[in-house]
Amino acid sequence: MLEQLSVTNTEQLRDNLTQLVASLNEKDIESRLHSMDKLIAEIADLYRQRHDRKALQNHHEKKRFLQSREEFRSLSENLESASKEKLDASIDLATIKQAYLDELTHAESLSDAGDYRRAITVLSKAKNTLIQAIILINKNRTIEYKLDFANIAEEYEYELRRYTSQKMLIQLAIREQQPGPGKTAKIDQTLAIADALHEEAQSHVQSEQYREALNSQEMAVGKLNSVLRLMGYFF
């Protein structure tokens, strides 16, 4: 049991026990035994506290891993949906998919072993791979669709879907990277502009001014792309 405690606590308790044993005699044996009982209780309490802290930490890490795995699932579904469209020949989707599935397998094996901290780190790499792939596909899809819209309203709806998708990617990326105060301030400022442009587009739609709505929505998506670039996702 002593080996489970911190070095400082262990040495202190051992010294105390040594002093007690060395000073034992028939006259004060009862008093010494009582003191030893108190020390044993202290050892048990320290061990229990350490065990409780470790169990609580493990519980939190498991919860974070499960949340991260759910985010991974959402991203993979997003990628599957995006990849149903015509893709540029330069996008090797099979290689990308194998990369993030290998990372998922590794993360799952770590979680099965109870190493949730490392599992979260590996799963973060997998999610970043997915985010990069989705951004790349969205860029390619924009080029493909520019010639295929039936009208301005349909093109606006597409830009609206892009806006929603990019916002989700940004929210996940922020949770993954946890940027510092300086970068967070820039991100928040740019997101505020994007949201204002998005609201402006919705106002135009209510007035059936789809050309103006499309212009505002495209600018909103452009601001979201600026945030993604700020966070290191280049496309």
Image (spheres, grey):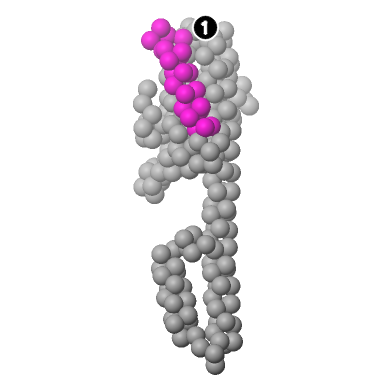
Span of residues in magenta: 87-109
- 56 falls in the magenta region: no
- Residue 70 in percent (x, y) is at 59, 33
Q: Position of residue 186 (x, y in %)?
A: 39, 42
Left or right relative to 199: residue 10: left
**Residue 152 appearing in the image:** no
Tell me where residue 133 sits by quadrant. top left
Residue 97 belongs to the span the image colors magenta: yes
**Residue 61 vs residue 231, the one in the foreground:** 61
* Of 91 and 15, the residue lying toward us: 15
The residue at 57%/53% (across/down) is 55
Q: Residue at x 46, y 40 (%)?
A: 118
Identify which amino acid the numbered label 1 is placed on.
Asp
Which residue has dot 1 on it? 148
Q: Residue furthest front?
A: 26
Q: Magenta span: helix, strand or loop, mainly?
A: helix
Residue occupying image coordinates x 53% and y 54%: 54
Q: Which quadrant of the figure has residue 78?
A: top right
In the rendered image, the vertical position of residue 52 relative to residue 219, given as above or below: below
Q: How many marks?
A: 1
